[in-house]
Amino acid sequence: MAAAELPLAIDVGETAVSGVYARPAHPIATLVVAHGAGAGMEHPFMRGFTAALNDDGVATLRFNFPYREAGRKFPDRPPVAIATWRAVMAAAASRSEGEPVWAAGKSFGGRMASMAVAEGMPAAGLVYLGYPLHPPGKPEKLRDEHLYGITVPMLFLQGTRDTFATPGLLESVVDRVGPGATLQWQEGGDHSFAVAGRKRAPEEIGAALADPVAEFIRSHPAPAAGTAAR
């Protein structure tokens, strides 16, 4: 039976953002999931990913950043996005019954999660669904320096055709981060994990990423909610 979804309003300073929490019986962890720059938490990719994780025994909390909540086009600046991450992670931790709380995000959402953890936000681990290592066509503009101070487990799921991460550059970054970081290539996938010549709905694409994420979480036991260090 699918886990019931609970709508949430999460205070972030003087505003509030929407979230959706789903908790299967006896979850192994809670994964907080942020959307990318161009789509909100109700995008079919996000819904498919979180629903499949619930089936894999992982509780989820997906949420909107303030700019999406307000209907704006351009993403929030890092200070606002990081403050939002902190508030949502605290909301997830308050609902934990002892299981660890992880942070995950699609592109922009994952990058902001990593910056928040680098600045001290507690998380048992990080999952990147297409890490935006550099702007397309600008491999010299790397967004990597903060990653090297993060000590929690990190899983990079990346399409081999993703123009936001030149394969050799991302492999070098992951190697430099050290043994706590794992890179799993999704063959033929672009930045949205779509594969040329293979027709799949966004919901199906998101759902297909749940199994490797759940397996990574299972293979990295972590302290309970609120106790993990960066």
Image: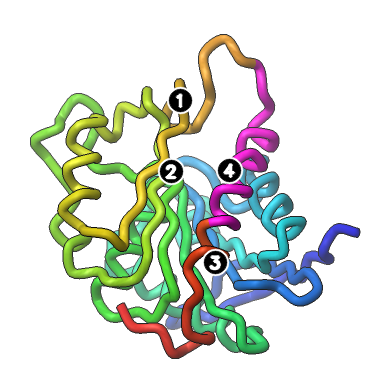
Characterize the local packing of mark 2: few (<14), some (14-19) or many (20 or more) Cα atoms within 10 angstroms.
Answer: many
Q: Majority secondary structure of the magenta segment? A: helix
Distance from disc 3 to disc 4, alpha carbons, whole Å, reads 15 Å
Residue 170 placement, left or right of 155: left
> Where does the magenta region start and end?
199-215
**Where does residue 213 sit, x and y in percent of width and height?**
55, 53
Q: Which label's residue is closer to the chain start, 3 or 4?
A: 3
**Residue 73 against residue 102 in the figure, above or below:** above
Residue 198 is left or right of residue 226, and the answer is: right
Number of marks in picture: 4
Of the residues under marks 4 and 2, which one precedes in the sequence?
Answer: 2
Q: Nearer the viewer, residue 129 or 228?
A: 228
Measured in 3D between alpha carbons, the distance from the residue under mark 3 to the one under mark 1, in whole angstroms, is 26 Å
Mark 2 or mark 1: whose residue is earlier in sequence: 2
Q: Is residue 15 visible?
A: no
Amino acid type at circle 2 is Leu
**Which residue has dot 3 on it?**
32
Q: Which element type, helix, strand or loop, lies under badge 3? A: strand
Front position in the image: 14 or 110: 110
Residue visible at 23% across and 35% down in the picture: 135
Q: Which residue is mark 4?
A: 209
Which amino acid type is marked by label 4? Leu
**SS of the residue under disc 2:** strand
Q: Is residue 115 magenta?
A: no
Q: Residues within 10 Å of mark 1 (few under 14, many from 20)?
A: few
- Is residue 184 among what the camera can see? yes
- Name the outermost residue toward the left: 140
Q: Find residue 137 and report its image quarter.
A: top left
Q: Is residue 213 magenta?
A: yes
Mark 3 or mark 1, which is nearer to you?
Answer: 1
Specify which label sits upstream in the sequence, 3 or 1: 3
